[in-house]
Amino acid sequence: MSLFGSSGIRGVVGQAITPELAINIGAAVGSLGREVLLAKDTRTSGDMMVNALCAGITSTGANASYAGMVPTPTLARAAESYDCGLMVTASHNPPEYNGVKMWNPDGSAFDSAQMRQMESLIEGRGYRLADWRGVGRCLAHTGAIENHISAVLDSVEATDADVILDCGCGATASVSPVMLRRLGCSVLGINCHPDGYFPGRMPEPTEENLAILKQLVLQKKVDVGIAHDGDGDRMVAFDEKGRFIDGDRLLALFTVFLGAKNVVAPVDASMVLDDLVKGKVVRTRVGDVYVAEALKASGAEFGGEPSGTFIFPDETYCPDGIYAAALLASMTEEGKLSQMVDDVPRYPVSRGSYPFEAKNRKRLESKLEKAMRSLRCLELVTVDGYRAQFEDGWFLIRLSGTEPKLRLTVEARKDKDLKGLVSKADKVVRECLR
């Protein structure tokens, strides 16, 4: 597909993302459903996108209701009483990016068939405009934040955990601090003011971007440090020792805590899940939409991605970083978070990315396929990118679905084996990029 990546439509504002595109997206959605819910994160181009989407929706005769600036999972939960929900966000991307994520009433992102239908409607202008008597209305939706907080409090056990929370100046600033305090936590917030320039740190909650949070966790001696991305579908953490708990570790922790017998995870998730799960680990393409699709099809109890997105099907099929934050805080009632982390098997892993010029994507795809299919390995998995399996571990090389980057993930059972696999994978990548 030309418009959709692994998580909606997104790109640089004024280049890939324009008011014209937003109008066409709105018109396409308005031709499929009569009641559409809109929301945005804190990005500076949010109002422009919302207004353009609203114009497109109402031009077809459908109604557009606006929930304001809220996190993605808040919008997805509120969309249950609409035909669909549109979230204006670029999630973890830098501030110059924006985009649109599309949600079904059950909280799941538009699936592959729906994305193809949307692309056909947008690119072919396959929608009918209403006459002057039938133009739709722009309405207000209230209560989305309170309903989300109430749903979390109804499901998660109260805790008096000491928490430092970094919202990254994103949309969770209006939800997570309030929710955690009402859960019983003592909360020290940083970057908990909405600002689309993201002055505190970049929206992606990597360990490198969270140096201040780590420092404060150690200084204040709290139970847990929690961080979100720009729109709140992601959550990562630090334990009380100041150790970063990435998405892979959190996947394992939640799997154990929930007692999940069947789990869904993408091809870049750790093989530790295969050691922990008593039932089956279903592997998918990278992207929460594909994890949600597999959860619905398999009936698995839990799913998520190493990026820090987690889906709890009993709650919603939307990745909910806010719910995940509450659950992790509540887990500290069972004991020290560091001990829980240490109790889960840990394999050395290396993740990296290599930028490339977007115009070279097709040529890079061709070179990568040729290089990987000629590689000597035990098994080559091509669900998404190329995952080469070896006796001592595996590596995955894939093109990002959200930005012009080639992503590399390497995991081994022993430290001594990781270096060799990283070197082998890095050689393939650099030859393809040459």
Image: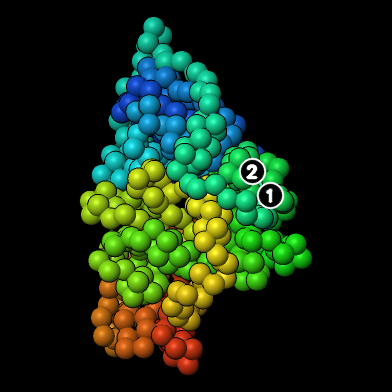
Q: Amino acid at mark 2?
A: Arg
Name the residue type under label 1. Answer: Val
Q: Which residue is mark 1?
A: 187
Q: Residue 82 location, x and y as percent?
A: 38, 27
The outermost residue toward the right is 219
Position of 229 compared to 152: left or right? Answer: right
Mark 2 element type: helix
Residue sitting farthest toward the bottom: 416
Q: Is residue 49 left or right of residue 270?
A: right
Q: Are marks 1 and 2 in contact (CB under 8 Å)?
A: yes
- Say what secondary structure mark 1 lies in: strand
Residue furthest to the left: 297
Residue 102 position, x and y percent, is 40, 39
Graded by Cα atoms within 10 Å as few (under 14), some (14 to 19) or many (20 or more), the crowding at tag 2 reads some
Q: In this orientation, which residue lies closer to the viewer: 57 or 78? A: 78
Asked if residue 312 shows in the view, the reply is yes
Left or right: residue 220 versus residue 6 is right
Which residue in the structure is indicated by mark 2? 181
Residue shown at 25%/81% (left/top)? 379
- Give the x, y percent position of residue 69: 59, 34
The quadrant holding residue 58 is top left
Counting residues from the start of the chain, the first of labels 1 and 2 encountered is 2
Answer with left or right where residue 400 lies relative to residue 263: right
Mark 1, Cα crowd under 10 Å, few <14 / some 14-19 / many 20+, is some
